[in-house]
Image (cartoon, rainbow, N blue to C red):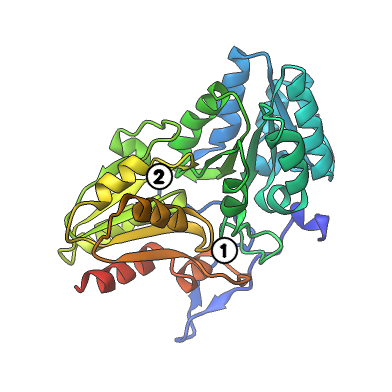
Amino acid sequence: MNHATRKAAPAAAPATAAAGKPRLTTSAMIASIAAEGQRTKPAPFGHALVALARENPAVLGMTADLGKYTDLHIFSQAFPERFHQMGMAEQLLFGAASGLAAEGFMPFATTYAVFASRRAYDFIHQTIAEENRNVKIVCALPGLTSGYGPSHQAAEDLALFRAMPNMVVIDPCDAHEIEQAVPVMAQHDGPVYMRLLRGQVPLVLDEYGYTFELGKAKMLRDGPDALIVSSGIMTMRALEAADLLRQDKVEVAVLHVPTIKPLDEATIVEAARKSGRPVIVAENHTVIGGLGEAVAGALLRAGVAPAGFHQIGLPDAFLDAGALPTLHDRYGISAAAVAEQVKGWTGR
């Protein structure tokens, strides 16, 4: 893998509509998934970590040549003596983080999700998870939030970390949730993996009076026609799709599940027991081994058979490269694509 791609990316080629008019496009590397005009907040993780470090002297910031691209540069400016730049060496990053945790520190180690879940998986498994070390792993470009293609698209990270003993797994929706999740992660004694949205991150959940709780799912809106169980940016898309569906007189419930492990099976099962509506799991992850299969297993164990079970997620394939709006439409995870699929499953 070419490490030079960490720092710069060419803009996607200008697209042309069929009528010959230019169509707006974005850089293939863009990590922000905010729509035009959407409320955003800059670098919520970086600012939340600085706030935490002011209260807790054990907090350290560590990265593997990606401080600027995981918003950890904000921490490095505030606490240069507690910031560790490990270079292009993810295995060293996590090995060192484990050692520092063994000495009583609380490292927040950042990189891209692909590098943690593929290149350094064994180091995390053996030196952090097996030893139950208090390391917080925070990784950018989760799922399909980069247009770079398979080298940088972490479509299977939740499946990998969900299978790791002792590991807590979090997939936050927006800036509001990331800010709340950081101090909660610190309160948990043990390893945590959190997907990171960085840069200008959308604000969504503050409109719902939402408070993040580790291991808890929250119903954001209710509706009799379908239940969407979602995590990460797909909760944002599910809420947008719900607004579109309401125009067609389709009312859907949206249950946000930010903690993939431990899974709030009780809340999911209770919501799925309502008769007459299909259960649809939406995730920015391959349909193999992520939230969808976790929810399916929970329903099966509880003996719950909803009026249909469906998954909206990324295919079991290496994904294309390109501009994010195009890719989200192509793989069915844009708001419009979610709404269209739900309409089909509700028979409307």
Q: Nearer the viewer, residue 115 or 16?
A: 115
Residue 35 visible to the viewer: no
Residue 101 placed where, x, y %? 73, 23
Tell me where residue 288 appears, x and y as whole percent.
53, 63
Q: Quadrant of residue 219?
A: top left
Q: Does residue 50 appear left or right of residue 80 in this picture?
A: left
| Residue at 67 percent of width and 34 percent of height | 72
The circle drawn on residue 257 is 2
Mark 2 vs mark 1, CA separation in Å: 29 Å
* Mark seen at residue 266: none
Q: Is residue 75 visible?
A: yes
Q: Residues within 10 Å of mark 1 (few under 14, many from 20)?
A: some
Secondary structure category for the residue under label 1? loop
Front residue of 86/188: it is 188
Q: Which residue corresponds to mark 1?
A: 26
| Mark 2 nearby-residue class (10 Å; few <14, some 14–19, many ≥20) | many
Q: Is residue 182 left or right of residue 214?
A: right
Q: Judge whether 25 appears above or below 162 on screen.
A: below
